[in-house]
Image (cartoon, rainbow, N blue to C red):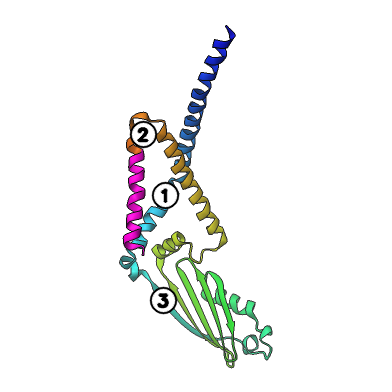
Amino acid sequence: MTEPIIQAAKHKDPKKAKKKVAKISRWLHIYLSMVSFAIVLFFSVTGLTLNHAEFFAGKTITTQDKGKLSASWVNPKDTNLVAKLNIVEFFRNTYHVKGAVSDFRIDESQISVSFKGPGYAGDVFITRETGEYELSQTRTGFVGFMNDLHKGRDTGKTWSWVIDISAILLVLISVTGLVLLLFLKKKRSNGLWLAVAGLILIYIIYKIWGQ
């Protein structure tokens, strides 16, 4: 009597496991999709603006400024004594220069400083002998800012983590969606064929335009 009961229990276990996997996958897929909604929308919209950047080229604004710094900041004999912090803070406070310092070069006659940020670039050229400088700032507007966020260009480590987390979430959504499809008997075959067709299409596009 006990053997049939044990066998019946063994037969039920796989079904329970499948139901549990389906339930967990459904839960993850729904809530990860909700969490990732803004991410998917952001990368979708900025993908379009990147692909049609020529429509937004007119939004770029470049400004030029000139002035003079204290010669003691820029013209000591020992280049290690150049007042780097004072120079950077002067331009931040005076001209509201943004972004991180991406380059600070010192040669015999000139100092050049570059600031980079999403949708922004600033370049300063300073004559060491006189302290005279020229500052050029380029702002690409809101769309340019968003496009640089999409590309992760000049965005820093924090935004790099945001991109990594976004990628992981999208992978999880894709995997849980595939798992859910496997539990839909009527739509499973068509769904898998479409997935394979999509992979083949991507490969064909790569072979035509990617090389």
Circle 3 — which element? strand
Magenta-span inclusion, residue 204: yes
Q: Which residue is mark 1?
A: 40
Q: Residue at x 33, y 29 (%)?
A: 186
Residue 158 placement (x, y as % from top left): 56, 58
The Cα atoms of the two marked residues, 1 and 2, are separated by 25 Å
In the image, residue 34 above or below residue 151: above
In the image, residue 147 above or below residue 134: above
Number of residue marks: 3
Q: Nearer the viewer, mark 1 or mark 2?
A: 2
Residue 26 placement (x, y as % from top left): 46, 33
In the rendered view, does 67 fall on the left or right side of 86? left
Three-letter residue code for mark 2: Arg
In the image, residue 28 above or below residue 160: above
Where does the magenta region start and end?
192-211
Q: Residues within 10 Å of mark 1 (few under 14, many from 20)?
A: some
Q: Which residue is mark 2?
A: 188
Q: Main secondary structure of the magenta part?
A: helix
The C terminus: image quadrant: bottom left
Label whose residue precedes the other's in the sequence (3 or 2):
3
In the image, residue 203 above or below residue 113: above
Residue 179 location, quadrant? top left
Three-letter residue code for mark 1: Val
Q: Which residue is mark 3?
A: 62
Q: Residues within 10 Å of mark 2 (few under 14, many from 20)?
A: some
What numbered label is drawn on residue 210? none
Residue 140 placement (x, y as % from top left): 41, 69
Label whose residue precedes the other's in the sequence (3 or 1):
1
Can residue 77 be spotted in the picture? yes
In the rendered view, does 129 fall on the left or right side of 198? right
